[in-house]
Amino acid sequence: TEIIEHFLNEPVFFEIYIDGKSHYQIGTDCYYDSGELPEEFVKEIIGTMTGHNDLMSFAKGKAIEKLTMYSVKGDRHREYSDLLRGYNLSVATSLKDSIEATTKTADKGNALKGICEELGFSCDEAMSFGDSGNDCPMLEYAGLSFAMENGSDQCKASAKYITKSNAEDGVAYAINKYAL
């Protein structure tokens, strides 16, 4: 809750996940800059979150699974990311100007590894696809990993291959070419 308290005093919109559900502090949505996203889409997304008048009280004593911040630009992005890393959290991004923080072991790479172990597959038998920074651990784990052509540079550096863009059905293209 120390982290929540800190960011409630900053000009930033963020959500926390508890029991798989998203929660935010009412009144902070004014800090969300929709940027390139349509305003209707942003309203719909915020509408799926549960707003609280006192997020601190709600979160007290509960396990926070993830914290996601939006519209964090420039120096603040670096400052907030470094602060979260100082709490020994894994920090990634999936949208421009966003920050996602989880425990060090809660990433897509460990999730894929767990699925492979449960099903009896090796990493060499796994395929993964991604377009953002939060996909990197999964791309690094899988034997066949593909970054979308329109993906981030960080994502492309983590993948073994580049496939067509999302708009060009890059996942289907790669599955047809490499798996079928």
Image: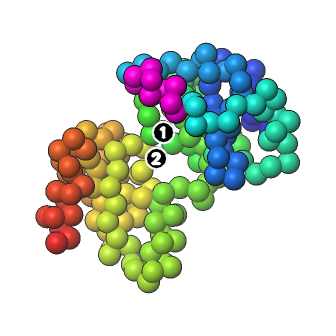
Judging by the rendered image, the residue that carries numbered circle 1 is 93
Judging by the rendered image, the residue that carries numbered circle 2 is 134
Question: How many residues crowd around disc 2 within 10 Å: few (fewer than 14), some, or many (20 or more)?
Answer: many
Within the magenta stretch, is there residue 42? yes
Q: Amino acid at mark 2?
A: Asn
| Residue at far left of view | 177
On-image quarter of the C terminus: bottom left
Identify the disc placed on residue 108: none
Magenta residues span: 37-45
Left/right placement of residue 42 relative to residue 131 reads: right
On-image quarter of the N terminus: top right
Q: Amino acid at mark 1?
A: Thr
Where disc 1 sits, the SS reads loop
Q: Main secondary structure of the magenta part?
A: helix
Left/right placement of residue 114 relative to residue 82 reads: left
Q: Quick one: 59 or 120, which is closer to the camera?
A: 59
Residue 88 location (% of width, % of height): 67, 47
Residue 134 location (% of width, % of height): 46, 47
Within the magenta stretch, is there residue 162? no
At x 44%, y 28%, the residue is 41
Looking at the image, can residue 5 be seen? Answer: no
The answer to whether 75 is drawn above or below residue 107 in the figure is: above
Where disc 2 sits, the SS reads helix
Q: Quadrant of residue 24?
A: top right
Residue 101 location (% of width, % of height): 60, 43
